[in-house]
Image: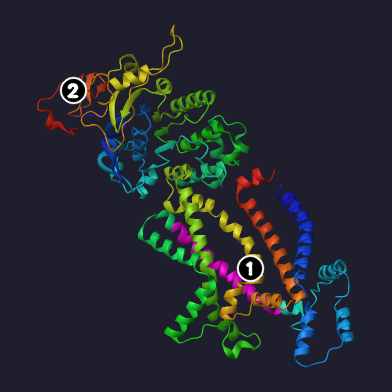
């Protein structure tokens, strides 16, 4: 039954991704002008003579002279059959190359952030719920309101300033200067780990705060349910019954967010990454959009959307697998 | 205070007081309740919603959430299994509600069946898993493979068909009646000596109710356990109970054997309850005879007898000045009412008397 469900969902994925690709492509084409106009403007303002013939040659080279459906067809077939996302005009590199350099670090930041969020938010949420209206509960409620209400980039700025004023350290970037361009080594890894917790805490803050509230609310609902009292009346210890029954039931929102992680792995937190100068893909996307770097921006948007869809699917499958109520009723 | 307890008592509750300390004030949910449960017998507790019957039995297993609930006074003596000559009594009211001692009693010596079969099982685990959990918790030396067989036996005993398949079913896959059967199977899996049934049939439809009642009585005979049966349904109580206690606002107002109580109800509240049952065989169907008034707000209980503001036999100057004692009016029949007890001189002194 589960395999059937997964199979059906995978089939549905095909038309969905095709539609997404069309939308990504159209979105990228929407702004007036194209990358060549920008490029020609730049060259001319730099004093270089660019003849109409040369522009036309470039246009042909990049396939910009073709009709939009043709351009789309070229773009999507290249991605699907050759794994070729095209070339970035601004970086003068293949899109694949640019992403390959940044995706691993982005993924590291995202995955570690997610782990940080779960490891902190779930226990705190559970504790707050089981000790509702205690001092500790009020404390974390206060912290989580601040966490939810403060934008990540502002938090990053405050953090940078405090780190500089109090400890006289620069919390910018993922590496110290001597490792920035160095090839990977043990020392570089250690150096990264020393830096990476800063963006993790800052990016994770808002999510942790939100997840804490969700977990607390879910737990409060579950704690009053009859089955918790039943479990207690059987003679289970408090910890064991909490973990086995209400916590387990409250975990659904946590499992659903696993899916959202996937797009996050690529996008990173754009603004926080800009402020902290972390080499993730987020800033690249922003720059690409500003420059109308069509292939780069389109590819990132497309990849993000596909990952969102795939992530949601993974979440759904996880939920079906974990929650018998969904398994037997939702999947009929 | 009371005549000495016969040796066949399993559970003795003496002057139990469970109060809830809320922002609005103190709610005396259970305010001086005393009763005995004898081995193999069924005690029925009856009363309107909010009369403290559930809190009373939750206090026995120490399941009253604290805060805000606290047992402020009284004893709950559980006479443990005989060892040699005498029996050893544990005062459950003195135990740590999270301690090992009460946990060893819960589910093993005293187990409970609840009102809501829909939500009584955890939704994420199979019925079998939850029964096996209880068995492994309390029965030493039982392997998990044996526990599964025991769980299936228990399910079969409560009349669940295809027990070897149902054991792997999730709660939401069963009907309310089946779930309540499974609940009973779980409660009986460790052969308790006392089963507390907290309105076990209230949420079920009438045909299923009858089946569950029959099942409970048959199992009681088979296992030889005592039962405390809580309900607000007089018909059910007449069917199952040996002894009945009627509760009103945290106190027992009348207690007698089931026949005595139905033949000779003495407290005006009990009489009101019995009168309010509609009789279909009457020649001309009269209006429903409800008890006048409503249950008072827990923060504004009338002074004197708590029932005085709704009582048809209200005696001004007496009932509103003191709480009557629970006095024996006939052998084994106790009533808390000034109609039957000597009016004590100097009533002011017995204020809050118990």
Total number of numbered discs in the rendering = 2
| Residue depth check, mark 1 versus mark 2: number of the one nearer the observer | 2
* Residue B192 vs residue A125, the one in the foreground: A125
Residue denoted by label 2? B316
Query: Does the magenta run of residues contain A104?
Result: yes
Taking the view exactly as shown, the residue that stands out farthest to the left is B346
Question: Which quarter of the figure has residue A280?
Answer: bottom right
| Mark 2 crowd level (few <14, some 14–19, many ≥20, 10 Å Cα) | few
Q: Which mark is residue A264?
A: 1
* Residue B199 vs residue A41, the one in the foreground: A41
Question: Which quarter of the figure has residue B112?
Answer: top left
Q: Which residues are magenta?
A: A100-127
Pointer 1 and pointer 2 on the same chain: no
Image height of A173 relative to A114, above or below: below
Image height of A222 relative to A118, above or below: above
> In percent of the image, x 33 and y 22: which residue is there?
B292
């Amino acid at each position: 039954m589960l395999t059937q469900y997964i199979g059906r969902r995978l089939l549905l994925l095909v038309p969905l991704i095709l539609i997404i690709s069309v939308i990504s492509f159209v979105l990228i084409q929407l702004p007036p002008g194209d990358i060549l106009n920008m490029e020609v403007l730049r060259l001319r303002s730099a004093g270089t003579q660019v003849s109409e013939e040369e522009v036309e040659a470039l246009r042909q080279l990049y396939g910009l002279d073709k009709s939009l459906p043709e351009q789309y067809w070229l773009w999507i077939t290249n991605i699907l059959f050759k794994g070729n996302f095209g070339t970035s005009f601004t970086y003068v590199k293949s899109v694949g190359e640019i992403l390959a350099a940044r995706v691993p670090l982005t993924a590291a930041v995202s995955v570690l952030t997610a782990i940080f969020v779960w490891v902190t938010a779930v226990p705190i949420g559970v504790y707050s719920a089981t000790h509702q209206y205690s001092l500790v509960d009020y404390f974390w409620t206060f912290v989580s309101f601040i966490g939810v209400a403060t934008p990540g980039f502002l938090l990053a700025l405050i953090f940078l300033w405090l780190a500089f004023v109090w400890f006289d350290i620069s919390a910018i970037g993922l590496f110290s200067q001597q490792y920035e361009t160095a090839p990977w080594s043990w020392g570089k890894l250690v150096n990264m780990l020393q830096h990476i917790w800063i963006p993790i805490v800052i990016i994770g803050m808002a999510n942790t705060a939100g997840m804490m509230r969700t977990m607390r609310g879910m737990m409060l609902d579950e704690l009053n349910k009859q089955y918790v009292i039943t479990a207690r009346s059987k003679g289970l210890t408090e910890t064991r019954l909490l973990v086995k029954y209400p916590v387990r039931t409250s975990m659904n929102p946590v499992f659903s967010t696993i899916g959202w992680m996937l797009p996050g792995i690529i996008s990173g937190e754009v603004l926080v990454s800009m402020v902290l100068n972390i080499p993730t893909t987020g800033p690249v996307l922003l720059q690409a959009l500003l420059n109308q770097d069509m292939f780069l921006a389109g590819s990132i948007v497309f990849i993000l959307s596909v990952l969102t869809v795939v992530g949601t699917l993974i979440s759904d499958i996880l939920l079906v697998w974990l929650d018998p109520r969904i398994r037997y009723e939702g999947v009929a | 205070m009371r005549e000495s307890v016969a040796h066949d008592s399993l559970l003795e509750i003496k002057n139990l007081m469970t109060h809830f300390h809320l922002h609005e004030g103190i709610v005396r949910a259970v305010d001086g309740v005393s009763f005995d449960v004898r081995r193999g017998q069924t005690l029925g507790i009856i009363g309107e919603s909010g009369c403290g019957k559930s809190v009373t039995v939750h206090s026995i297993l120490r399941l009253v959430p604290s805060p805000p609930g606290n047992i402020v006074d009284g004893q709950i003596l559980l006479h443990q299994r005989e060892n040699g000559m005498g029996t050893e009594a544990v005062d459950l009211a003195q135990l740590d509600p999270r301690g090992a001692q009460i946990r060893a009693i819960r589910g093993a010596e005293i187990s409970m069946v609840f009102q809501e079969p829909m939500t009584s099982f955890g939704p994420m685990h199979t019925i079998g898993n939850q029964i096996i959990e209880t068995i492994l918790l309390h029965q030493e030396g039982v392997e998990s493979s044996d526990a599964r067989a025991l769980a299936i036996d228990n399910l079969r005993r409560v009349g669940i068909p295809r027990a070897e398949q149902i054991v792997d079913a999730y709660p939401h896959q069963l009907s309310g009646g089946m779930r309540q059967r499974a609940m009973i199977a779980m409660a009986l899996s460790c052969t308790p000596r006392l089963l507390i049934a907290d309105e076990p049939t209230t949420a079920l439809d009438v045909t299923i109710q009858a089946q569950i009642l029959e099942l409970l009585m048959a199992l009681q005979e088979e296992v030889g356990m005592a039962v405390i049966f809580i309900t607000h349904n007089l018909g059910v109580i007449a069917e199952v109970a040996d002894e009945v206690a009627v509760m009103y606002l945290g106190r027992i107002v009348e207690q007698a054997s089931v026949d005595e109580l139905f033949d000779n109800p003495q407290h005006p509240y009990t009489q009101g309850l019995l009168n309010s049952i509609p009789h279909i065989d009457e020649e001309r169907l009269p209006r429903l005879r409800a008890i006048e008034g409503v249950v008072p707000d827990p923060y504004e209980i009338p002074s004197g007898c708590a029932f005085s503001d709704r009582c048809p036999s209200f005696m001004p100057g007496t009932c509103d000045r003191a709480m009557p004692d629970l006095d024996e009016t006939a052998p084994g029949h106790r009533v808390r009412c000034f109609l039957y007890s000597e009016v004590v001189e100097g009533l002011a002194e017995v204020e809050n008397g118990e």
